[in-house]
Structure formats: C-alpha cells, structure tokens
C-alpha cells in the first residue's frame, strides 16, 4: 500500500501545481497590455482555456 499511497500523493501534488500554474497564467494574462497575450512555454499540451 505504501507505493500506491506515494503515487497518489504525487498525483495530488501535480494537480495542485497545475491548478496554481493555470491561475498564475490567468492573473498575468489580465495584466498584459492590449494586443499582447501570454505564451505558455511548458511541456503540457494546450487546453481549451479561453484567451
């Protein structure tokens, strides 16, 4: 059970990090001057988030 619990913990942490990164992009996107958009430079595939 230890290995399974560790894996589950890692997945939960990963989900929290993803959520924080998304919130950060939304917050930063709102502060950019008109005509500019935030380019996401990471390994995750793009999602259907509104621009």
Image (cartoon, helix red, strand yellow):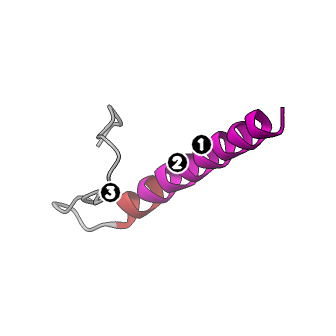
- Spatial CA span between label 1 and label 3: 15 Å
- Residue receiving disc 3: 42
Report crowding for label 2: few under 14, some 14 to 19, many 20 or more residues within 10 A (C-alpha).
Answer: few
Q: Position of residue 47 (x, y in %)?
A: 33, 35
Can you say which quadrant of the picture contains the N terminus?
A: top right
Q: Position of residue 46 (x, y in %)?
A: 29, 40
| Main secondary structure found in the magenta portion | helix
- Spatial CA span between label 1 and label 2: 5 Å
* Left or right: 46 in relation to 17: left
- Residue 18 tag number: 2
Residue at 52% from the left image edge and 52% from the top image edge: 23
Residue at 75% from the left image edge and 43% from the top image edge: 6
Report crowding for label 1: few under 14, some 14 to 19, many 20 or more residues within 10 A (C-alpha).
Answer: few
**Sequence-earlier tag: 2 or 3:** 2
Q: Are marks 1 and 3 in contact (CB under 8 Å)?
A: no
Closest to the observer: 50 or 21?
21
User: Is 15 placed above or below 36 here?
Assistant: above
User: Is 45 placed above or below 22 here?
Assistant: above
**SS at mark 1?**
helix
Q: Residue lying furthest left in this view?
A: 35
């Amino acid at each position: 059970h230890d290995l399974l619990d560790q894996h589950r913990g890692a997945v939960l942490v990963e989900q929290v990090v993803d959520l924080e990164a998304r919130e950060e992009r939304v917050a930063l996107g709102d502060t950019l001057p008109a005509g500019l958009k935030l380019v996401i430079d990471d390994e995750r595939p793009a999602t259907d988030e509104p621009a």
